[in-house]
Image (cartoon, rainbow, N blue to C red):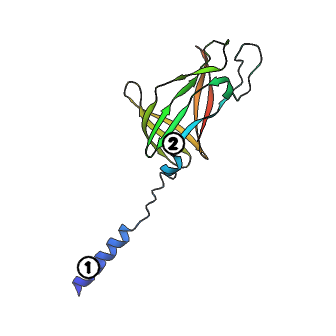
């Protein structure tokens, strides 16, 4: 009888502790929700700037001022990101202005309901992370617009599917 009671207690304990929720609370966006190709929807400057030197400040939305080919591709647990930096560099005679483009970075990512952290390597092989905000189906990052060698302002780039 004691053996049966011990066996019953052991089985009950095993079932009680092995049945738990699979939700760890860390990755609330499933990878399938993020899967897709994202392109630039908008570039919003943190302050108005006089891009062409005519004394007229541009509106904060400078999306059409820059010719940027931003691209993010998410497939399963991997991510590819073409990093951009809007660049004026003192050349105010041409518009739209170009973006400095880094080679496409490959890596993995982690996400939750508010953000995505892209884990990759810098050009010299050091670990690097890039953080994006998640807003509905958009990925948002903050970069610097290089105006001249000694003047930069922040811009928010929104990528949409």
Lateral position of residue 55 relative to residue 138, left or right: right
Residue under the image location 43 percent in, 45 percent down:
77
Q: Residue furthest right?
A: 56
Measured as percent of width and height from the top left, residue 17 is found at 36, 68
Other-residue count near label 1 (Cα within 10 Å), few / some / many at <14 / 14–19 / ≥20: few
Residue under the image location 46 percent in, 29 percent down:
104
Lateral position of residue 40 relative to residue 24, left or right: right
The C terminus, quarter of image: top right
Q: Quadrant of residue 100 in the image?
A: top right
> For this rendering, which residue is in front, 5 or 24?
24
Measured as percent of width and height from the top left, residue 15 is found at 35, 72
Q: Which mark is residue 72?
A: none
Other-residue count near label 2 (Cα within 10 Å), few / some / many at <14 / 14–19 / ≥20: many
Disc 2, SS: strand
Tag in front: 2 or 1: 2
Q: Is residue 23 visible?
A: yes
> For this rendering, which residue is in front, 75 or 127?
75
> On the image, numbered disc 2 is attached to which residue?
116
Residue under the image location 51 percent in, 29 percent down:
83
Position above or below: 10 against 37: below
Q: Which mark is residue 7?
A: 1
């Amino acid at each position: 009888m004691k053996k049966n009671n011990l066996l019953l207690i052991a089985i009950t304990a095993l079932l009680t502790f092995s049945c738990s929720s699979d939700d760890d609370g860390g990755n609330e966006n499933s990878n399938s929700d993020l899967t897709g190709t994202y392109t630039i929807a908008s570039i919003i400057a943190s302050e108005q700037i006089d891009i062409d030197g005519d004394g007229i400040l541009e509106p904060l939305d400078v999306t059409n001022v820059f010719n940027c080919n931003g691209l993010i591709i998410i497939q399963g647990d991997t991510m590819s990101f073409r990093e951009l930096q809007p660049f004026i560099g003192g050349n105010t005679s041409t518009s739209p202005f170009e973006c400095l483009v880094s080679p496409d970075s490959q890596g993995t990512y982690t996400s939750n309901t508010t953000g995505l952290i892209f884990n990759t390597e810098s050009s010299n092989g050091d670990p690097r992370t890039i953080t994006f905000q998640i807003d509905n189906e958009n990925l948002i990052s903050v970069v610097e617009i290089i105006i001249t060698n000694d003047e930069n302002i922040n811009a928010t780039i929104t990528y949409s599917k």
